[in-house]
Amino acid sequence: MTSTPFTDRRSTMTRRRMLGAGVRVGAGAALAAGAALPLGLAAPARADSAGTGAAGTAGSAGSTGPVRPTLPAPTGPYPVGTVELHLVDTTQPDPVAGPGKHRELMASVWYPAREVERDAAERYPVAPWVPAGTMAALMASLGVPAGLVEAPLTAGRQGAPVRRSGRPRPVVLYSHGAHSYRADHTVMVQELASHGYVVVTLDHTYDAVTEFPDGRVLTPLHDRNHQMGPADFADDIRYLLDRIEELAAGHNPDADGRPLPEGLSEAIDPRRIGMFGWSKGGTATARLMLADRRVLAGLSLDGPMLPDITDDLDRPFMLMTAVNTPAASPSVAGFWSHLRGWRLAVQAEGAAHPSYGDTQVLVPQLAKVVGMSDEDLRDWTGTLDPARAVRIQQAYPLAFFDLHLRHRRGHLLDGPSRAFPEVHFLP
């Protein structure tokens, strides 16, 4: 494995400092940019032998061997499959990689799968939360000793055949936050897949911790000449949209020609596409929708909406806010005023900036293992109970995309719910 770090570990900020600069002050540069350090302390999650482990408690610091926390199981009726795609954009030269090189991206496709028989389980192993090289880079970024924490297992079976439904399935795209990675909302991603969606996640190279098939591991690039903004994220996703159309047409966009799961092309409906993103990825979701009408509905997870978005958006958009509310942020308020279609803003009481992601369930499991104080833990998770946060991030995105991509109307988005008393509807 070749690791290509673009950060100096000696100057790496702690998550607490990063959030302290942004969340507590409100106008801090880190949060305004939608920045997030890699989830080094949130380490891996383990599923059971079927890949559907429930949230639990990590091993104690005194136990032998590495710690492997657990992710909550998705609640949908279908097993989940997943496959990686290595993509090369031959229209985009990559000056960082050198002359003659083009922009490379790593994506994952999550989908409803067929049941995997016991004798086929070895052919379709449970997918890790992140590859081993990525996990090692995440741990190193925060100084966690090597071998202390193992990479998570998810609910997804690698390469499992796609469940047939008789018609193509709606597609949801995901864009991560600054200095993050495509796995950091796996709870939400596999929840949607278990309910019948095809979900495609993407690492934004040079603003992500990402591992390529040849073993290269790239970490975020902090050179000001190569900083990526929400518009650059949106460009990456627009390229990904074209590859999804190729998939739907029966072509394989993987740069290495690796085989695709049986039935994947037939499962993709390029006419029903939604998108969600966290932090900078939430802003990128809005920017892509303004530039490309193929995305029919968008969801932002506490996106700061910077730089200011001043164009009107006429398609459904939902804000799941924590600290970036219309009342607290002029840029979010400005974006809110330009929404001309269906719109909704909700806020979970006690939520911190990362609360709608895997952080909320994984960090508490590892807090004692890595010696995290209660104050540090609150910086990561706020005061929102992790179990409640999981239920919120499973229920509300599903309800949103069901309404706008499947036209299935429930009541969760109509107003405050007795089932979720901590979720407030914002004016």
Image (cartoon, rainbow, N blue to C red):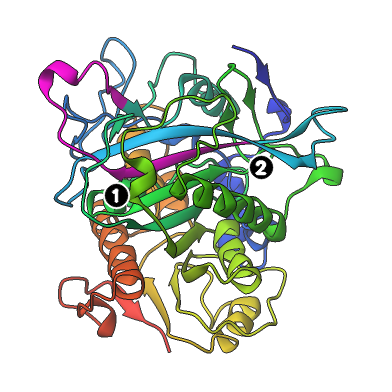
**Vertical placement of residue 104 versus 343, above or below:** above
Task: Determine whether the residue tagged by mark 1 lies in a helix, strand or loop.
Answer: helix
Instruction: Give the residues in magenta.
Output: 105-126
Residue 207: mark:
2
Give, as a three-letter code, the residue at label 1: Ala
Q: What percent of the width, then of the height, locates residue 89?
A: 69, 40
Q: Which mark is residue 273?
A: none
Residue 91 or residue 246, whichever sits in front: 246
Which residue is label 1 attached to?
193
Q: Quadrant of the N terminus?
A: top right
Q: How many marks?
A: 2
Look at 33% across and 71% down and name the residue there: 400
Query: How much space separates mark 1 and mark 2, taking CA atoms?
Result: 26 Å
Residue occupying image coordinates x 58% and y 48%: 36
Q: Is residue 119 located in the magenta-colored stretch of the structure?
A: yes
Quarter of the image for the C terminus: give it. bottom left
- Quadrant location of residue 404? bottom left
The foreground one among 118 and 247 is 247
Looking at the image, is 285 positioned above or below residue 233? Answer: below
Is residue 293 toward the left or the right of residue 53 in the image? Answer: right
Tell me if residue 395 is in the magenta stretch. no
Residue type at numbered disc 2: Asp
* Front residue of this view, candidates 269 and 328: 269
